[in-house]
Image (cartoon, grey):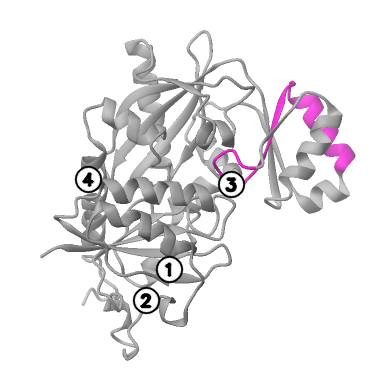
Amino acid sequence: MKIKLGLLYGGKSAEHEVSLLTARAVSQAINFDKYEVYPIFITKTGEWRKGNALIGPAETVQMLQFGERESKPNNIISFLPEEVSANSAMETKTDSNLDVIFPLLHGPNGEDGTVQGLLEVLNLPYVGNGVLASAAGMDKVVMKQLFAQAGLSQVPYVHFIRKEWKNNQAALLKKMEENLKWPLFVKPANLGSSVGITKATNREELLKAVEFAFKYDRKIIVEQGIVARELEMSVLGNDAPRCSVAGEVLPTKDFYDYEAKYEDGTTNYAIPANVSTELLKKMEDAAIRAFKVLDCSGLVRADFFVTENEEVLINEVNTMPGFTPISMYPKLWIESGLSYSDLIEELITLALERYEEKQQLEHSKDGE
């Protein structure tokens, strides 16, 4: 009997389009002999729509077209059956009896623990990181604070919220200019795919960059620029994670922005990266420590800056890295000997293993 797999994609996020690209790539690599695939699309306004089962890769284009169609009442997804008692609600799967959900969502309202929390409440197995890791990994400030607790080296940074900026702009500007060195990178704290990020080389550019970043989030992080190599490593597993080979990003622009990642194809990559055995070991150690301090599961891409003297500074981790044809996460595993299809298979297996482990937990104080 085939496993019923729900592909959850789209989302109410500035990274909606990235999710569509990921959904296309993943759906074309799934083993349809083993899985019965159901598309579940979230519109930009937050509506959930459920499509009919897909039976082969040729239908994946229809899946994306389904997602863009106007919503119809009978396409709105309902997770719980119409008739279910209060006592059995948490033990019931969806009305289509899905066995596992693969969230292919990037950014807020998908990668930040919100959807993961919903799936936990509904007692549904799902691929990838749980609520805590997703939420902490989405918020760059919280993530960096946890990394600091784990003793991981990072670039200097300053963070603030909109109200602080409004009330204490002069003091914050002084703090940044005294504690950070130009250039500065201004980022929304809760967004990925380089959306809303600007490089600033002077105060005038910094002011514009902050206002631009506030369009995407109420919390801003400003990081000191650094002359360093940009290296990445993919991590896979639950309690015993393992690392891929390292890859190097070789952007032809000032920095690795949204267009370079997903649109213009101008960025070059070195896979595997030319790194020493000692440097590789440092990166593996930092990637695993970052994975564990956030209590991650399934998958993570760890991004690093490596200085000329091979000091490893962790930049961030991505708890739902892209799966587009030009994405680093799958490329690094392919170079490590794990095919795209096998990677998807292992992620689903890890999700089911984590779910089964959670089912062994007791939910009463007497253990009955």
Q: Earlier in the sequence, mark 3 or mark 2?
A: 2
The percent position of residue 313, horizontal first and vertical second, equals 52, 24
Instruction: Label 4, secondary structure: give it.
Output: helix
Q: Residue 193 lies in magenta, yes or no?
A: yes
Left or right of 349 in this view: 188: right
Q: Which residue corresponds to the image point at 83% horizontal and 37% vertical from the top-left? A: 207
Residue 132 visible, this angle: yes
- Which residue lies under the disc numbered 2? 79
Q: Residue 19 lies in magenta, yes or no?
A: no
Query: Mark number for residue 118?
Result: 1
- Which residue lies under the disc numbered 4? 346
CA distance separating discs 4 and 1:
23 Å
Q: Amino acid at mark 2?
A: Phe
The percent position of residue 150, horizontal first and vertical second, equals 47, 35
The percent position of residue 77, horizontal first and vertical second, equals 41, 75
In this view, the mark in front (4 or 1): 4
Q: Earlier in the sequence, mark 1 or mark 3?
A: 1
Q: Which residue corresponds to the image point at 32% horizontal and 78% vertical from the top-left? A: 90
Quarter of the figure with the C terminus:
bottom left
Q: Amino acid at mark 1?
A: Leu
Instruction: Decide: is 287 above or below 269.
Output: below
CA distance separating discs 4 and 3:
27 Å
Mark 4 in CB contact with mark 1 (< 8 angstroms): no
In this view, the mark in front (1 or 3): 3
Mark 4 in CB contact with mark 2 (< 8 angstroms): no
Mark 2: few/some/many CA within 10 Å (<14, 14-19, 20+): some
Q: Amino acid at mark 3?
A: Leu
Query: Mark number for residue 154?
Result: none
Quarter of the figure with the N terminus:
bottom left
- Closer-to-camera residue (137/273): 273
